[in-house]
Amino acid sequence: MIPISRPILGAAERERVSSVLESGMLADGSEVRAFEDEFADYCGAEYGVATSNGTTALQAALSALGIGEGDCVLTTPFSFIATANAIKHVGAEPVFADIDSETYNLDPGAVQEVVAETDVDAILGVHLYGLSADMAELSDIADELNVPLIEDCAQAHGATYRGQRVGTFGDVACFSFYPTKNMTTGEGGMIVTDRRKVADRVRQFIDHGRSDTYIHEFVGYNFRMTNIAAAIGRVQLERLSGFIERRRANAAQLTANLTETSLVLPEEPQRCRHVYHQYTIRAPEREELQQHLKRHGVATGIYYPVCIHNQPAYELDHVAPVAERVATEVLSLPVHPSVTRDDVDHISEVILDYAQ
């Protein structure tokens, strides 16, 4: 079976982790500090703060920006539920705008319609599947409203918009290092920002509100990353460019093989560089195609079959026709670096056979 995802961990990661184990300094420490600096530098940001996962990164970032009870944060209904959950965790409420049918990211026109009728206190954009949202438009809207812009980069490590890496457009950005992501620490997250006060507040927030050894200025959380996770992350960051190139090559091969089908294939706008966390097609008869692929040894994923506002945890009176339609059709194919050229041809042949 060709899996939908597979983390790539080798001798370098094992050696770095072994060094941490031998040192006895397993919790937050020097490896975390080095990883924070290296990842911030990779993104082109001034500050990095490592966290326990991508969700806690979002929660810490929102809190550091002063988002809380009584506030509304505009975001997408078509994302992993953590995007909206983080808003709820700080006591705010998510407000949803519809998505663009080609990029699956927030549609700036839909955002304009929502903010014309609803007061929002922040905008949280998601770079879904590894493709940047329209950051020029979202930045303009946030500036016009004088509200912070947060980037959810959980799926977009290394993606660019107009030649600039994501994570550097908003007031703060959040990444995830879950095992399925383009790079991993096992579990982990990262906040990057150019705003020192935000970075300082985040660092306190994830460490029980600590300002000194046993001085705690507010009630915070234990959302710290460990040295073990950071050791893995530092090696993975060194390999990230190669991982991205392999994903892009696999995606290009899939697109070339499937161009003549009726499937809707991923878009890469000229202004963007896609890093293909997922290679997501759209198929009206998705379940049938998914089962056909499974019978021929190809695993797939559906990200995401239910829009957030329709989840049992939310069940909001909201309509997002594009997102709701897309949710019934999306199907992700294996594109990760472990997928070989022969694998890509096999996946393509199985789909072409189904199409015929």
Image: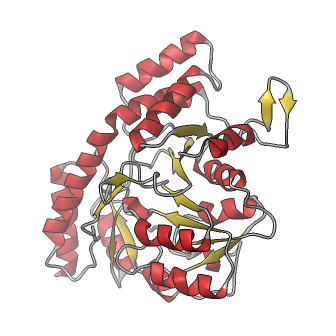
Q: Is residue 322 above or below residue 126?
A: below
**In front of the other: 73 or 321:** 73
Q: Is residue 346 visible?
A: no
The image shows a total of numbered marks equal to 0
Q: Is residue 261 left or right of residue 123?
A: left
Q: Is residue 59 above or below residue 189?
A: below
Q: Is residue 216 above or below residue 70?
A: above
Q: Position of residue 192 (x, y in %)?
A: 53, 45
Q: Is residue 285 above or below residue 91?
A: below
Using the rendered view, name the quadrant where residue 161 is placed: bottom left
| Residue at point 79%, 38% (across, down) | 209
Q: Is residue 161 visible?
A: yes
Q: Is residue 244 left or right of residue 14?
A: left
As drawn, the residue found furthest toward the top would be 22
**In front of the other: 341 or 66:** 66
Colouring mode (rainbow / by chain / secondary structure / one colour): secondary structure
Using the rendered view, name the quadrant where residue 9 is placed: top left
| Residue at point 65%, 46% (across, down) | 198
| Residue at point 24%, 67% (across, down) | 270
Q: Position of residue 54 (x, y in %)?
A: 58, 49
Q: Position of residue 139 (x, y in %)?
A: 49, 67
**In front of the other: 45 or 22:** 45
Q: Is residue 144 left or right of residue 328?
A: right
Q: Position of residue 305 (x, y in %)?
A: 50, 74
**The C terminus lies in which quarter of the figure?**
bottom left
Q: Is residue 90 left or right of residue 133?
A: right
| Residue at point 74%, 42% (across, down) | 205
